[in-house]
Image (spheres, rainbow, N blue to C red):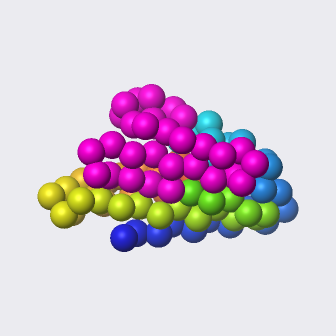
Amino acid sequence: MPQITRKYPGKNAGEIYEKVDEVMDRLAQKLSLDYQKDGGAKTGKVSKMGVSGAYAVKDEEVVIDLKFPMLVPGSMRQKVQEDIERKLDGLFG
């Protein structure tokens, strides 16, 4: 299960959560994913047909865990992971 961690020095959990929530909301709409979030805990998750991703935000960082069913090809897993990493890298750009 891939895990992606990004650090944003000087950014508090609220600032990071706001940006990650926007990205996840757009992604969920674009890919017709079920998106559940908890603003108080600064966490959220998306899922569809066995593919799921969950994130947790703390001060200066976000951690995303991805889960794919065995049937999903490695190339598709890689594409999803790289797309998420690209979006996270540009979060405050």
x then y, percent, for residue 66: 41, 61
Image quarter (top left, top right, bottom left or bottom right) of the N terminus: bottom left
In the displayed structure image, the side of residue 8 where residue 29 appears, left or right: left
Q: Is residue 63 above or below residue 13?
A: below
88 or 43, which lies in front? 43
Which stretch is magenta? 25-54
| Residue 73 in sight in this render | no
Q: Name the residue at 36% across, 61% down.
A: 67
Q: Name the residue at 32% across, 52% down.
A: 51
Q: Name the residue at 51% across, 32% down.
A: 26
In the displayed structure image, the side of residue 40 where residue 83 appears, left or right: left
84 or 66, which lies in front? 66
x then y, percent, for residue 69: 24, 59
Q: Is residue 50 above or below residue 27?
A: below
x then y, percent, for residue 59: 79, 63
Confirm whether the magenta stretch covers residue 12.
Answer: no
Q: Name the residue at 72% across, 54% down.
A: 41
Q: Is residue 22 above or below residue 49?
A: above
Confirm whether the magenta stretch covers residue 34.
Answer: yes
| Residue 69 in sight in this render | yes
x then y, percent, for residue 3: 47, 69
Where is residue 75, by image quadrant? bottom left
In the displayed structure image, the side of residue 31 where residue 5 appears, left or right: right
Q: State how many labels appear.
A: 0
Where is residue 74, by image quadrant? bottom left
